[in-house]
Image (cartoon, rainbow, N blue to C red):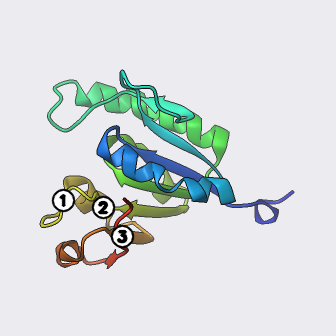
Amino acid sequence: MSKYDRAPRLCLVSSSGGHWEQLQKLQPLIDKYDGFYVTEKTQFPENAKYFMIQTDLKDKLMLPKMIVNGVRAMRIWFKERPDFVITTGTMVAYPFYLMAVLFNKKFVFIETFGRANMATTAGKMMEKHSDLFIVQWETQVKHYKKAIYGGCLY
């Protein structure tokens, strides 16, 4: 079977917390197509298939954690071979974003609901190579060149 004879493979990836809650609203995509979730490992049980190390820009161990996450992401990528990467952010999604660009796969970024009046660091970083860049507030459109208003996931 060629890659064209199968349903698109979706990788839905986000950090924990509100980003994760928003991403889970896309479960109908997983139900309709073939896909899997990736999120950060926290003390709260989640229904993701894969877990990454939790980190953020202010973490003094961010670089080594991102290296570990990058290696994990490569393993996941070559095992799962996604056609689309869909994310609501943040740092945990960055290795998947890079691989989507490198392997010429579709990348969809959904800006967080939590920022109505300003751009996010993740959004600014990932907008350039996104195939679809969706914002959840009409007021966010003005902060990005490629943004389209898609409404709220909640």
Q: Which amino acid lies under the numbered mark 3 shown in the image of this protein?
A: Ile
Q: Residue at x 77, y 66 (%)?
A: 4
The answer to whether the residue labelled 2 contacts the one labelled 1, judged by CB atoms less than 8 Å apart, is: yes
Q: Is residue 11 above or below residue 139?
A: above
The residue that disc 3 covers is 134
Task: Indicate left or right for 6 with 22 as reference.
Answer: right
Write down the quadrant of residue 31 in the picture: bottom right
Q: Residues within 10 Å of mark 2 (few under 14, many from 20)?
A: many
The residue that disc 1 covers is 115
Q: Position of residue 47 (x, y in %)?
A: 53, 34
Where, quadrant-wise, is the C terminus in this rendering? bottom left
What kind of element bears circle 2? Answer: loop
Write down the quadrant of residue 79 in the picture: top right
Q: Which amino acid lies under the numbered mark 2 shown in the image of this protein?
A: Glu
The residue that disc 2 covers is 111
Task: Indicate left or right for 95 with 103 as reference.
Answer: left
The answer to whether the residue labelled 1 contacts the one labelled 3, judged by CB atoms less than 8 Å apart, is: no
Which residue is at the front of the view, 132 or 139?
A: 139
Task: Indicate left or right for 83 with 19 as reference.
Answer: right
- Comes first in the chain, label 1 or label 3: 1
CA separation, marks 1 and 3?
A: 13 Å
Q: Is residue 85 above or below residue 46?
A: below
What kind of element bears circle 1? Answer: loop
Which residue is at the front of the view, 133 or 43?
A: 43
Q: Which amino acid lies under the numbered mark 1 shown in the image of this protein?
A: Arg
Which residue is at the front of the view, 5 or 63?
A: 5
Q: Residue at x 27, y 31 (%)?
A: 55
CA separation, marks 2 and 3?
A: 6 Å
The answer to whether the residue labelled 2 contacts the one labelled 3, judged by CB atoms less than 8 Å apart, is: yes
Q: Residues within 10 Å of mark 1 (few under 14, many from 20)?
A: some
